[in-house]
Image (cartoon, helix red, strand yellow):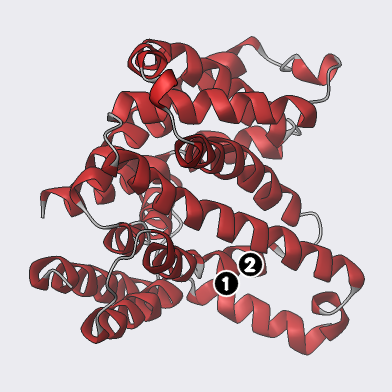
Amino acid sequence: MVGTFLVILACLFWGMDTLIRYPLVERGINPVTIVFYEHIVLTLIFSLGLIPAIKRIGELKLADVFSFIVVGGIGSAVATVAFTEAFQYLNPSLVILLQKFQPVVAIILSAIILKEEIQKQFIIWAGICLVGGLLISSPDIVRFYDLMRSNFNTVTSDNALRGYGLVAVSIVGWGATTVFGKRLSMVGFETKSIMAGRFLTGLLVLIPFVSWNRSLILPQGEDYLRILIMVLISGALAMWLYYQGLQRLSARTTAIAEMFFPFFAILVNWFFLGKQLNDWQLLGGAILMIGSLVIQIKKY
């Protein structure tokens, strides 16, 4: 139960991220620039965590190096950039809706990579949790349905296909991050070492994506403070809680608990921005809570 609680608490802090991140993007700041600054600060914060990893560098296996590349380079950098870019080609509601299938990827990879046994009861309850997650996104489903009725070409065009590819990269990247992060903890890496390696690798991979011009200078000095606050809450604190939970849970159970992120993001918007949840979203949250608790209690 402790592991699930820690991951759910991490999701709460990730949900609070939207109060700062989206206003920055809406004001025209390049999302890649925001992510780049995040990784600089997080790498500095967790740089001491690299010391134990450096001591083990001679013991690193190729599989360990690959795991860090997946967690940091693909999950923390490439998947984030791909998810951001997808909004340029697809309706935002469709991007968010498709992202709900990330746990499916994580569960499949946990069986293949970590050899986790997927019981029939787990599949049933995971399906119930997925239904809850989709109900949480019911407004996005309605908007997508209306879009298909009014302009079907927007979801079948060449641009839409590019968008689907980008979303697929983010889904696979973030799903793989859960699995390979679990693998690193299983072979003895401490949380601080995993986080340090994640953010350093992500920073190095982000460098080619950054526009090295005046766009790196944020329009307001306060924006640097906003990013710092966001990094401390959704980056440092949330990720530390997440990896502490991941150490205690299987990758498949962690993937289910991660589904609370969009629910908390909506709750935060309701509490701070007055965007109320409808009955279907509240029902979805209740279903997700019950399903994840059953999986944890029964240890499926």
Q: Which of marks 2 and 1 is nearer the N terminus?
A: 2
Q: How many numbered badges does the structure rendering display?
A: 2
- The label shown at residue 140 is 1
Q: Can residue 187 be seen in this view?
A: yes
- The quarter of the rendered structure image containing the N terminus is bottom left
Q: In this view, does 118 lie above or below 244?
A: below
Task: Please state the horizontal and vertical placement of residue 221, each as a whole percent of the image.
Answer: 64, 10
Q: Nearer the viewer, residue 171 or 117?
A: 117
Identify the residue shown where x is 59% and y is 70%.
Answer: 98
Residues packed near mark 1 inside 10 Å, few (<14), some (14 to 19) or many (20 plus): some
Dots 2, 1 in contact, CB < 8 A: yes
Mark 2 lies on residue? 93
Secondary element under disc 1, as helix, strand or loop, is helix
Q: In this view, does 226 lie above or below 91?
A: above
Task: Please state the horizontal and vertical placement of residue 185, each as a whole percent of the image.
Answer: 29, 40
- The picture quadrant where one finds residue 210 is top right
Q: In this view, does 151 lie to the left or right of 281?
A: right
